[in-house]
Structure formats: C-alpha cells, structure tokens
Amino acid sequence: MEKKERLRKIIWRIAVVIFAIVIIFLAFYNIKDLKQAKRAEYTLRQLKELRIALEEYYQLANEYPNLTQEGAKDNLRILDYTDKNGKFISFAEIYGRDSLPSTPENENIGESNMIYDTDNFSKGSRTGGWNYDFSGRTGEIHANLPVNIFSQNVDWCEY
C-alpha cells in the first residue's frame, strides 16, 4: 500500500509540474501575441495620423509634401515654406511632429522611418518604413512591411 501511495504522490507532482509548464508556455505565447497586436495597432494608428496630416496639408497647399526629400524623414521642418500669398505652410505643424514615425521592429526587420517613393505598393521592399506616392502626386501612403508581420494577417501594401 505504501508503494502505491508514494507512486500516486510522484505522479501527482509530475502532473502539477507539467500543468505549470503548460500554463507558463501559454502565458508566454499570449504575451508575444499581445506585443504583436500592439505593434500592428501602433502601425495602423501612425498610418491614420499620416494620412490625415497629408490630406490637411493638401487642402492648404493644393499638393502633397515631398516626404521623400533628402533629410525630410528626420526633419519635417525642411519642408516648411511660404506660399505666393505669404501664407506659411508647415507639414510638421499640421502633423504635430518634427519627424516621421518608425514602423516597429520584430524578429525579421528593424524599426525604420525610411520613406520610399512608389506608385506600386505591392512591389515595395517590405523592409520597414513607408511607401509613399509622391511622384504620382496621389499622396497615398502605406507601411512598407511584409504581409502578416505582426501575426494580424494584414497585407500592409493593401491597407
């Protein structure tokens, strides 16, 4: 009887350890999933803010700002100008920031605020940063990220 009782205790302890390992694994998996979701939400929020600022700028200037200009990604103030009517126009003031935000990093790519001029968003490098149609004068902008980079099943060149 004593051997059976000891065996039950050992089996019970093993079961408790296995259960604890499973709980820890699930918690780690959920934390990783939450981090990925936050990165996707951050990117979507940045896209929305950029698009709103681009449209507000367009309403004032009748053209989109040249975000692809050398140095503009880190200093939006270099795009400031005074129009022919003497009105000061500043994308930085409209946007409320002095530089473009970076797309978040993950295991596959680093964070980046590089901006690429393109009119074919599906052919972006998908290495981080932003794809922006300045040459085509559409002002369209997308995150230059791989599909499903943050486990949210988002095709960033389409969004």
Image (cartoon, rainbow, N blue to C red):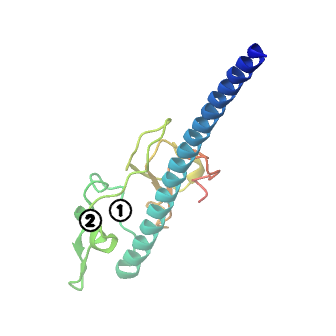
**Left of 9 or right of it: where is 62?**
left
Contact check, label 1 and label 2, Cβ < 8 Å: yes
Q: Nearer the viewer, residue 12 or 93?
A: 12
Q: Tell me how far mark 1 sits from mark 2, CA to CA.
A: 7 Å
- Residue 51, compared with residue 84, is above or below; it is above
The amino acid marked with disc number 1 is Asn
Please name whichever residue, 11 or 45, is drawn nearer the observer in this view of the structure: 11
User: Is tag 1's residue or tag 2's residue first in the polypeptide sequence?
Assistant: 1
* Residue 31 relative to residue 18: left or right: left
Residue 13 in the image: above or below residue 114: above
Q: Can you say whether 17 is above or below 75 in the image?
A: above
Q: Residue furthest front?
A: 1
Q: Quadrant of the N terminus?
A: top right
**Residue in front for this viewpoint, 95 or 116:** 95
Q: Furthest residue to the bottom?
A: 85
* Vertical side of 2 occupied by 34: above or below: below
Disc 1 crowd, CA 10 A, few/some/many (<14, 14-19, 20+) = some
Q: Quadrant of residue 2?
A: top right
Residue occupying image coordinates x 50% and y 35%: 108
Residue lying at 52% horizontally and 43% vertically, measured from the top left = 126
Where, quadrant-wise, is the C terminus in this rendering?
bottom right
Which residue corresponds to mark 2? 79
| Residue 53 in the image, given as x and y percentages of width and height | 39, 72
Q: Which residue is mark 1?
A: 66
For the view shown, which residue lies furthest in the top direction? 3
In the image, is 35 to the left or to the right of 53?
Answer: right
User: Residue at 26% of width from left, 52% of height from top?
Assistant: 71
Q: Position of residue 150 (x, y in %)?
A: 56, 47
- For this view, does 90 lie left or right of residue 150? left
Secondary structure under tag 1 reads loop
Label 2 environment density (alpha carbons within 10 Å; few <14, some 14–19, many ≥20) = some
Give residue 45's position: percent from left, percent from top: 47, 64
